[in-house]
Image: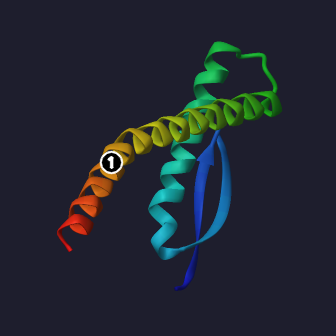
Amino acid sequence: MSQQKISVRILNKEYQFACEDDERASLIAAADSLDKAMQSIKSRNSTMSSDKITLMAAMNIAHDLIKAQQLLAQHDSEILSPIKKLNDKLEQALSQSV
């Protein structure tokens, strides 16, 4: 894969990144998401420093990620538990037929 440079705008500043071709769209989406989060915080707290806006946005995004991971783990558990029970029943039925 070849790397390319892309430019993104976050909180009215330009940043350049190098990324693989197949990662370009997701990097741009991540930058857009971060920019929206930071713009939202700034609009509610216009006197807040850029560093604090960045930290708050990072904390909010990390919190959302943790909640999503917990929800995914819960869904996995809810789905895998019945599948395991069915698999155990199948193995039991197959071992009795042999």
Q: Quadrant of the C terminus?
A: bottom left
Is 9 on the left-hand or right-hand side of 79? right
* SS assignment at label 1: helix
Label 1 is placed on what type of residue? Answer: Lys
Here the colouring is: rainbow
Q: Residues within 10 Å of mark 1 (few under 14, many from 20)?
A: few
Looking at the image, the residue that sits furthest to the bottom is 1
Q: How many marks?
A: 1
Please name the residue shown 48% across and 75% down the image.
21
Please name the residue shown 71% across and 32% down the image.
59
Looking at the image, the residue that sits furthest to the left is 97
Please name the residue shown 70% across and 36% down the image.
58
Q: Position of residue 89 (x, y in %)?
A: 26, 53
Q: Position of residue 17 (x, y in %)?
A: 65, 64
In the foreground, 26 or 63: 63
In the foreground, 26 or 76: 76
Please name the residue shown 66% across and 51% down the image.
14
Q: Which residue is mark 1?
A: 85
Q: Is residue 89 above or below residue 49?
A: below
Q: Position of residue 63 (x, y in %)?
A: 64, 32
In the foreground, 24 or 61: 61
